[in-house]
Image (cartoon, helix red, strand yellow):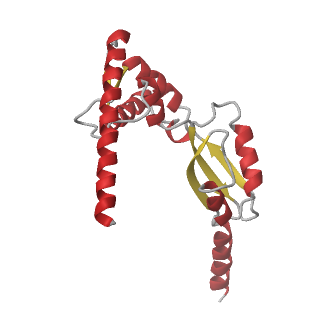
């Protein structure tokens, strides 16, 4: 009988150590955390003081340009306190900024939305290496990951880039994007006519 009681006591100790805290993963624009949707309801579900969280997040991201999407991890404790971890912006954001585009390709393999050099890729990899999930990975592994992300965005990686030629390429690309937007708008209008 005493052995089973001892086992129950040891099991109770193990059960007390289990962490039932809530974890939240989301992207929040730097310096623009507000109580409204979508952030407010997400915080409200986890019983976090929304005003205090927004103030804390905006203070921590005050030195970053406003509007940059920041992947944020929030661990909520049982006493309604939280642990906030803010990562570097997503790789796709850095790649689009380096290529000078605002939108990736609609058909990534068939069309090229922009171009970057290997130097750009290396610099982005050095920045992304500071992220907690990637800090133990080598630069080579991070560069491989960035090449795959660039491919899905329709960004081509080249050794050298002539600024004049690339400026012409971007002008042509703007025309293509405008045509794509018109086609999408026509499809939406046709769909609305069918459903009405």
Percent position of residue 119, x then y: 41, 17
Q: Which corner quadrant holds the C terminus? A: bottom left
Q: Nearer the viewer, residue 144 or 116?
A: 116
Q: Is residue 88 above or below residue 157?
A: below
Q: Which corner quadrant holds the N terminus? A: bottom right
Looking at the rendered structure, the number of numbered marks drawn on it comes to 0
Percent position of residue 16, x then y: 68, 70
Question: In the displayed image of the protein, which residue is found farthest to the left?
Answer: 110
Residue at position x 64%, y 45% from top? 85
| Left or right position of 108 against 143 | left
Residue at position x 71%, y 34% from top? 62
| Left or right position of 166 against 136 | left
Q: Is residue 54 above or below residue 30?
A: below
Residue at position x 51%, y 32% from top? 128
Percent position of residue 36, x then y: 66, 55
Q: Nearer the viewer, residue 130 or 89?
A: 89
Q: Nearer the viewer, residue 21 or 107?
A: 107
Percent position of residue 90, x then y: 49, 38
Q: Quadrant of residue 111?
A: top left
Residue at position x 54%, y 36% from top? 89
Asked if residue 154 can be seen in this view, the reply is no
| Left or right position of 132 against 165 | right
Question: In the displayed image of the protein, which residue is found farthest to the bottom?
Answer: 1
Asked if residue 122 can be seen in this view, the reply is yes
């Amino acid at each position: 009988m005493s052995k089973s009681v001892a086992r129950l006591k040891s099991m109770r100790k193990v059960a007390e150590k289990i962490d039932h805290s809530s974890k939240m993963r989301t992207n929040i624009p730097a310096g623009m955390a507000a109580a409204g949707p979508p952030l407010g309801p997400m915080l409200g579900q986890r019983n976090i003081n929304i005003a205090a969280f927004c103030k804390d997040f905006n203070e921590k991201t005050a030195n970053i340009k406003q509007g940059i999407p920041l992947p944020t991890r929030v661990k909520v404790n049982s006493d309604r306190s939280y642990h906030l971890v803010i990562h570097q912006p997503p790789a796709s954001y850095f790649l689009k900024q380096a290529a000078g585009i605002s939108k990736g390709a609609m058909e990534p393999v068939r069309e090229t939305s922009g171009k970057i050099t290997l130097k750009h890729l290396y610099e982005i990899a050095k920045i992304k290496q500071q992220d907690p999930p990637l800090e133990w990975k080598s630069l080579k592994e991070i560069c491989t990951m960035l090449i795959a992300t660039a491919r899905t965005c329709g960004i081509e990686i080249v050794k050298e880039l002539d600024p004049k030629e690339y400026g012409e390429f971007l002008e042509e690309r703007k025309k293509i994007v405008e045509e794509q937007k018109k086609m999408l708008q026509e499809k939406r209008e046709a769909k609305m006519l069918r459903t009405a």
